[in-house]
Amino acid sequence: AALVMFVGKAGVGKQRHARALEKALFTQGRHPYFIDGTNVLMGVDHDLTVDDTQAELVRRFGEVAYLLLTSGVILVSTTNAIGLADHSAVQALIGDMPSLVIDVDPSGNSTQPCDLRIKGNENEADVLAKITDLLKAKSVMS
């Protein structure tokens, strides 16, 4: 199990790469599950109001992620609501489960810590190879 979070602004290519990763993992016989912020917002977050805090959105996402990770899946996520700054809060909720943060930043100006930074327009195969290498380094894949 592992969490691979694609973070960045809307429309930067997160979903394209996340879906490609999900498909590649499935083709390899792994058990991926794709979830984006909209899935969570329309489900467990449907009762939140505009007055609720970002922290509650992040907490609920982390709880959902933890439940899925304990089932052994490789959780592939995209969300605009949870950014790089929120990753440590998610990591605290998922415990010692491995996680990767892929920052999709077309400007190339981001300085936030992450495991991989891409611009969003890269060749799919190249990005998948880099993510696979990171998953191997974290002993998620052999």
Image (cartoon, helix red, strand yellow):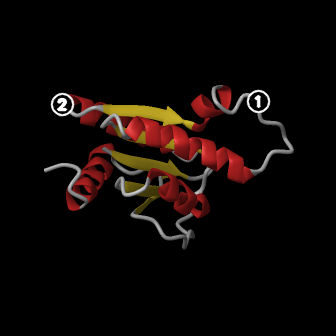
**In the rendered view, does 39 fall on the left or right side of 126?**
right
The single residue placed furthest to the left in the displayed view is 142
Q: Residue at x 66, y 26 (%)?
A: 42
The numbered mark, 1 or 2, whose residue comes first in the sequence reads 2
Q: Which mark is residue 47?
A: 1
**In the rendered view, does 14 fall on the left or right side of 44?**
left
Q: Residue at x 27, y 32 (%)?
A: 31
The image shows residue 99 at horizontal and vertical percentages of 38, 55
Q: Quadrant of residue 106?
A: bottom right
Task: Check contact, mark 1 vs mark 2: CB within 8 A.
Answer: no
Instruction: Give the structural element (helix, strand or loop) at label 2.
Output: loop
Q: Amino acid at mark 2?
A: Gly
In this rendering, the answer to whether 13 lies above or below 104 is above
**In the rendered view, does 49 fall on the left or right side of 99?**
right
How many discs appear?
A: 2
The image shows residue 5 at horizontal and vertical percentages of 46, 49
Task: Give the Cα separation between the discs numbered 1 and 2.
Answer: 36 Å
The image shows residue 77 at horizontal and vertical percentages of 47, 41
- Give the residue pinned by disc 2: 29
Q: Residue at x 72, y 51 (%)?
A: 54
The residue mark sitting in front, 1 or 2, is 1
The single residue placed furthest to the right in the displayed view is 51
- 24 and 55: which one is in front? 55
The single residue placed furthest to the bottom in the displayed view is 111
The image shows residue 118 at horizontal and vertical percentages of 43, 58
In this rendering, the answer to whether 26 lies above or below 6 is above
